[in-house]
Structures are given as C-alpha cells and as structure tokens.
Amino acid sequence: MNMRDVLELIEQKRQEFIHLPFFKFLQDRSIDLKKRASGIPFWAHFVMSFKDLNAYVLREEPTTDPIQAMINQHTYEDASHWVWYVKDLDVLGIDHSLRFTDALRFLWSEETQKARQLSYDLLRLCASQTEPVLRLVIVEAIEATGTTALSEGLVQLSQELQELTHKRPLYFSDHHLRVETGHIQAGLENGDEEQFFDSIQLTDDQRAKAFELVETVFEYFIRFYNGLLAYSQKHSLDRPFPKGYRVPQDEVEFTQSAIASDLDSIYLESYLLAQQPTSHR
C-alpha cells in the first residue's frame, strides 16, 4: 500500500483542526485587533526551535536515501522562516526592550509553557523516528497544520495589522502561505506531488505507525493553539508581556516600526544563500 491512506487521514484531521476555537477567535473582528494579535510573542520559542528541528534533527547529511534527500532540501527551506518572524516583531512595533533576565523568564514562564512543550514534543517525536518515510509523515502533518493556521486566521490577522501599521508582516501573512503548499516540495514541480506519494510503498507496520504519528502531531498543535488562545485572551498587543516584565515606558505603545523597506525577499534570500550547501544553490 502507498501513502494515499496517510494523506487522507491528514486531510481528515485538518478538517477537524479548522474548527479550533483559536481560529474563530482570530476571525472575529468584533474582538479588538490588539487582543487578537497579542499572542505573537508567545510563538517565539516554537519558531526559533523549529529552525533547530530542521537543521539538527530532520536533516541527515550525507544520505543515499531519496526520501531523506528530499527532507534535507525541505529543511533548508523551512529552517529559514524564523527570519520573517524576527523581522515582524520589529515591523509590527513590538520589538520591546526587556532585561535579559526578564526575557528568559518570559520564554520559560508558565504562560508560554505550551509553546515550549510543542518545541520539545516535536523534537522528541522526530528524533525517535529513524525511517525517512516516517519522518516524511511527520513533515506532512506539520505542513498541514501550518497552512491551515495561515489560511484560517493568521493571514486575515496580518492583513488587518498591515492596514493599521502600514507595514507588511511576512511570517503571519499571505507571503508565508504562498510558499507553503501543505506538502513537502523539495524540487517537485506543481502537480507532481500525487505521483510522488503514490510511489511510496508502506508495510503494514509502517502504515500503522504513520497513522499514530499523524494523530500525535495534530494533538501537539491543538494543545499549542489552545494555550495560545488562553494567552491572547489575557493580553493586548500594546502590552504583550505579563505584568512584572520591565518594558521601558516609552516602548509600550503600539507604534509603527522605523523600518521603511519592504522585507519580502532581502532577508530570506541572503539567509538561504548563506545556509545552503553548494549542491542546493
């Protein structure tokens, strides 16, 4: 049997995922925009850890396995998206100064625990799977959660923020969605995905494990988004950190960034060129 059954399960879980309360929260324009966007700092640990997940866990070089080679190429693409997130913090005017100790307290606080847990759970899950085909299943499930989150609320949020700030976010935007197809790309031409996945044969044991991995990945992200909703409901984007974190008074207002240039490609392209080995350029 091939991967088709696994992809059908991913789509089934994605259709359930669409109905998460967090996405309804993002879509509800009756709720103040600053509250709906206040969870952006909550993402920090996961976004930066996702870079390391791709670079140090999913990527295995050199390899003679064609599926692992595709995963490797995919990791060079996904490991660069943190650049958009970091620049968005500046573009959206929430790059506040914190004492280093307060920044550490925030990243490892109880309020952001669900973000850390997602990071650690994914690292452990990927490290536990040595078969490339099962790692591919994990990547496919992660991609499905990402494209769904963007299309079901994050892109709308980004558009509203752009209207307010006159600056264009990238990580939470249609820019990000355009490069995320919901599937691993890694050199595949548009329309080749179906043939590629149909060519991958699974044993009965691999199929059973793949189903388990899909369920697990979605459980991890559901827990993350439930935690993000709880955080967002307690904060506002002009005061995105919990009480007790020392943000200078002149930085607490939600203001436009001084950055004037469009960041569509400058940072991403330079980062990719610096990171990819010669064979991938």
Image (cartoon, helix red, strand yellow):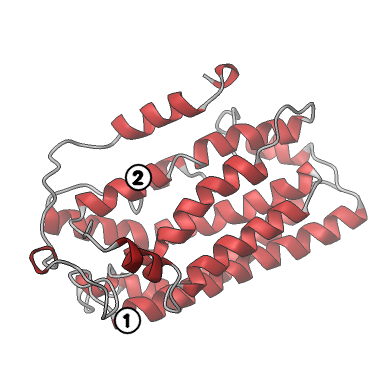
- State the residue position of label 2: 84
N-terminal of the pair, mark 2 or mark 1, is 2
* Residue 20 visible, this orientation: no
Residue 272 lies in quadrant: top left
- Name the element at disc 1: helix
Question: As drawn, which residue projects farthest toward the right?
Answer: 204
Q: In which quarter of the image is residue 153?
A: bottom left
Amino acid at pointer 1: Gln
Residue 225 in the image, given as x and y percentages of width and height: 47, 71
Question: Is 209 on the left-hand or right-hand side of 54?
Answer: right
The correct choice, above or below, for 210 with respect to 132 in the image is below
Report x, y in % for residue 104: 39, 65
**Nearest to the observer: residue 164 or residue 116:** 116
Residue 233, label in figure: 1
Q: Position of residue 152 (x, y in %)?
A: 41, 63
- Depth check: 83 or 108 in front? 108
